[in-house]
Each structure stands twice: as C-alpha cells, then as structure tokens.
Amino acid sequence: MSVSDRCRLPLALAFVVPLTLGLAACSSVGDATRSTLHKLTPYKVEVVQGNFVSREQVRVLQRGMSRQQVREILGTPLLTSVFHADRWDYVFTIKRQGVPEQERRLTVFFDGDHFDRAQGDEMPSESEFVATLDPLGTSRGKLKIPPLEATPEQLAKHPSHQEQQAKQRAHSGVSGAATAAGGGARSYPPLERN
C-alpha cells in the first residue's frame, strides 16, 4: 500500500461514517423527533378571509330592512351570485398557527329589496370571538388600554383653541374685531419656492 492510498482511507472514512449514521438516523424518526421538528418549523402566516359577523350584529337585523341597511350592519358580503340575486353569503375563515381553524357561514335572504331572513352557523359574540383568538390567555394582563378621554387636569395643562387663536391674532397684528367680523386678511405661506 502506497502513502497516497493510506491518506485516502481516513478521508473516505470521514465521509462514509457520517453519511451512514445520518441515513440510519433518518430511518428511526419517531413521534418525539417529529414533535421536536414541528416546534422548529418556520412561522406560518395568519390567514383571515371574509367578514366576521357577531351574534350582536345578527340580532340587529329586522325583517323588512333594505339591502343598504343590511350592508351597513354586516358589511359587504363575501359572495353574491347573479343566479341567486336574493341571497348574500357571509363566510369568515381564520387560520392561525397553534389554534384550530375557524370557519363560520351566514346566508342572508331577501324578498325583493327587503331583508327576509338569515340562516347559518351560530355566531359568537364579540367577546367570545376575542377569547378564541387568544385561547391560552397569553396576552391577558400584558395589554393596557389607555384612557381615551382627557381628564380636567390634563386639559388645564393645554391652552384652549380660543387662547391659541388670540395669540395668533396678537402676533400677526390683526385686530380682534376685524377677525371676529370675518373681514381679517389672512396670509398663507407660499406653496412652492423656485
């Protein structure tokens, strides 16, 4: 055996042994390995299609409403058909990673241009639907909704609109009487500079 043959033998073993072990490992993939691989899968995009219709919206519908009134309550239907002009179909599906797929259907029937009846799946209330979006409650307690109304103390910190206008009039030199009468000249900044 020559020196070059002795060098090739370890190099061949370096490729053959890992390849053999890899093939042996592939044949022994079990449930534990599959669950581990499932956890390592890439992120799947959330897919939401259609209009969510709540139980509260369905309860507002009254026989005899116009098509426009129904559209204002439920939104634009996902499906309308030329062959079924007196029928609108509302279909809602949502696919999220780690949560069972949701699909709900509601069919609205019209008698001419007036609402007749609705039939379909039992629609969840808005609060029930929100609970299905976060079944483990992972975001509960993390999300703080700020107050949407300013307190009197917060309002006192900011000058009122009238005070701001008075300051602008004093600064521009326009008298208050002329502005109050609507005769004050207003100046605007140029739109473009060449």
Image (tube, rainbow, N blue to C red):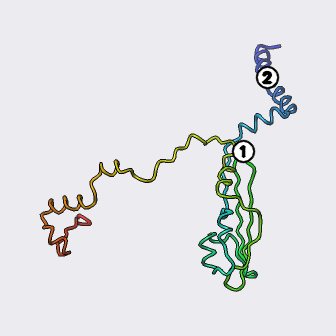
Kindly identify which residue carries mark 2.
Answer: 12
Mark count: 2
The amino acid type, in three-letter code, at marker 1 is: Gly
| x and y, in percent, of residue 61 in the image | 66, 73
Quadrant where the image shows the N terminus: top right
Q: Position of residue 161 (x, y in %)?
A: 28, 60
> Can you tell which quarter of the image residue 8 is in?
top right
> Can you give x and y, in whole percent of width and height, for residue 162 in the image?
25, 61
186 left or right, relative to 95? left
Does residue 38 lie above or below 16 as drawn?
below
What residue sits 12% from the left and 63% below the top?
173
Q: Residue at (79%, 15%) from the top-left corner? A: 6
Q: Determine whether the residue tagged by mark 2 lies in a helix, strand or loop.
A: helix
Q: Which residue is mark 1?
A: 98
Q: Amino acid at mark 2?
A: Ala
Q: Where does the C terminus fall, quadrant-wise?
A: bottom left
Q: Camera-side residue: 47 or 53?
A: 53
Give me the C-alpha separation between circle 2 and circle 1: 45 Å
Q: Looking at the image, which residue sits at the far bottom?
A: 112
Q: Are marks 2 and 1 in contact (CB under 8 Å)?
A: no
**Residue 163 appears left or right of 126:** left
Which dot, 2 or 1, sits closer to the camera? Answer: 1
Question: Dot 1: within a 10 Å radius of its alpha carbon, few (fewer than 14), some, or many (20 or more) residues?
Answer: few
Between 187 and 193, the residue placed more toward the observer is 187
Q: Secondary structure at mark 1?
A: loop
